[in-house]
Amino acid sequence: MQRSLAVLLICASFAFAAEYELGPDSKVQPGVPKGTVTKHSWTSAGTIFPGTVRDYWVYVPAQYDASKPAAVMVFQDGVKWASNVGNGWLTPIVFDNLIAKGDMPVTIGIFVNPGMLPARSPGLKPRLNRNYEYASTSGDYARFIVEEILPEVARDYNLTDDPNLRGIGGSSGGGQASFTAAWNRPDVFRRVLSFIGSYVNIRGADIYQSRVRKMEPKPLRVFLQDGSNDLDLFSGSFWLANQSLRSALHWAGYDYKWVAGEEGHNKVHGLPILPDALRWLWRDWETPIEPSREKTFKRPPSILDFLEPEHDWELVSEGHTFLEGPAVAPNGDVYFSDVRESKIFRVDAKTSEVNLFKDNTGWTNGLMFGPDGRLYTCRRKTEQIVAIDVETMEEEVIAEGAQPNDIVINAKGDLYFSSPWTKRVWFVPKGGEARIVFEDPDSGFLNGLMLSPDQSLLMVNDSRKKFVWSFQIEPDGSLAYGEEFFRLETWDKNSQSRADGMTIADDGHLFVATDLGVQVCNDKGPVVGIIRKPTKEFVSNVVFAGPELKTLYATASTKLFRRKLQASGVRHWEPFQPPRPGL
């Protein structure tokens, strides 16, 4: 049956015959060296998918040389992708032909079935793990491949550790699982093959249509295929979901290919285009895949509007125990605390030299400079707010007895501080007594604080939820009309944002340190971008510093990082009216 491909939506030229017929690269060719496929079994003794069993297959090309690391490509629903007969995808034949032509590197294929938890006795039903493993966006499946399957295969074969030479692919749920694995672990996989992918809300994969747009671009190359007659289910339309992901990849500037046809949820279209899809995916494989640095969609905001293309995170200081509370001084220097060591350090913003500023600080956490030039500190051990003259080192106790954690100070010298353990926010007017201005017994952990640029609003985040409160500040310092105004992004398996320290840009964008990354919210509430974390560790706090306040400093567990941005911070002792909010 002839099926027109006139509806192809392709970003760049990618031509196929008008018929879904197999080409020569999907057929055994005379004189082409043939690789071998071996079957193996795996019982998960680990903690990722405990108790599950599965088969997997390993393809080794005839050109494999054990003295040289081979490229790797992992396929989901392995039994079909490893097969050259029946309902198989003919992948070993395609690999043979493309490797022989030099269209892809010498590549070991690993074909993994989804797991199954066997029944305890005959007649009982086993638990099938496919949806749990494939449809989640949590990153657990990537961990399983990386921590269990790849090391097992590497015992027998020399596999490359270069993520640029590692691909992952599949169809339907296996396609989505492949994208999820690379999305969560671009340090392991950079090339993604997805046919008729299930980017619908089976277990939340519909989040990608916004998450791809918001996250700082990752070093991925993605091939997507789907048909206009794909599934339309309780979880959503596969056809529309694939187009939404394609649109997001295009908007965010990814290196991707979108090939559309008229077929349904099958491999009628995907099977004959597999050789060209792999050829495109592996093109120029010796050149590393880099994250996008250019916008393809000109209308702001985009995460790229906040980043400097030539600047990434750089390490400033390490070897600490747990860092918190970075604060910017009037000259742009940065002060930060090592809570567990009870120390405060200073970074010279011009020379980057890091020196001990003060020892024995009583588990000091949050820091901020006031309009009087003094450094205000939250001392958890002694339950005090203490102001330090950075020139004379003289100290003054401003408040005590309230388990302070984080702090902000306005231009008048009034301050607010959070006490997460008591679920309260306190206010201390300049020269006055501390009083409670907000308490919420239903909150999880009221943590980071920040003032709007004009100091009319106070923002307070909750680490154990996904919201940041916004309050209007009354003339007497009281808080009114509180709303859970900013909605943060979270991981699939955790509704807790782990939001901690916050800072604000001069255009009103709020920067929030979270477990997912540094989330950027516009002043109407939504997250418009997420800056990648500088490390896998927890990012506890951020602040704009440097002479022009265009460098974002971030404390991340035992290390301090910085990154130059296009955005600029504010001097909290100099309030001003920010621009009118955009979209």
Image: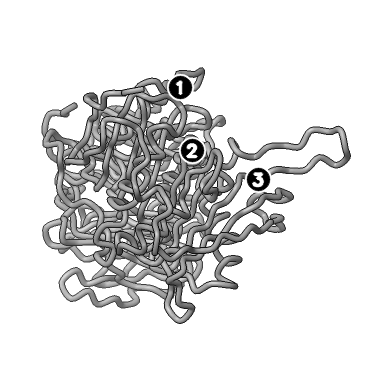
Residue 269, compared with residue 45, is above or below; it is above
Could you say which disc has been placed on residue 424 in the image?
2
Indicate the secondary structure of the residue bearing disc 1. Answer: loop
Q: Nearer the viewer, residue 346 or 21?
A: 21
Q: Amino acid at mark 1?
A: Leu
CA gap, disc 3 to disc 2? Answer: 46 Å
Residue 481, compared with residue 539, is above or below; it is above
Indicate the secondary structure of the residue bearing disc 3. Answer: loop
Residue 152, compared with residue 319, is above or below; it is above
On the image, which quarter does residue 538 sit in? bottom left
| Residue 473 in sight | no
Q: For the view shown, which residue lies furthest in the bottom direction?
A: 67
The quadrant in which the C terminus is found is top left
Residue 75, image x, y percentages:
49, 50
Residue pictured at 41% horizontal, 53% vertical? 94
CA gap, disc 2 to disc 1? Answer: 50 Å
Q: Do tag 2 and tag 1 residues touch (Cβ < 8 Å)? A: no
Of label 1 and label 3, which has the lower sequence position? 3
| Residue 253 in sight | yes
Q: Nearer the viewer, mark 2 or mark 1?
A: 1
Of label 3 and label 2, which has the lower sequence position? 3
Residue 199, image x, y percentages:
43, 32
Q: For the view shown, which residue lies furthest in the front direction?
A: 30
Could you say which disc has been placed on residue 312 in the image?
none
Q: Amino acid at mark 2?
A: Arg
Residue 259, image x, y percentages:
29, 35
Q: Which residue is mark 1?
A: 231
Residue pictured at 30% horizontal, 65% vertical? 335
Q: Which residue is mark 3?
A: 115
CA gap, disc 1 to disc 3? Answer: 24 Å
Residue 222, image x, y percentages:
32, 46
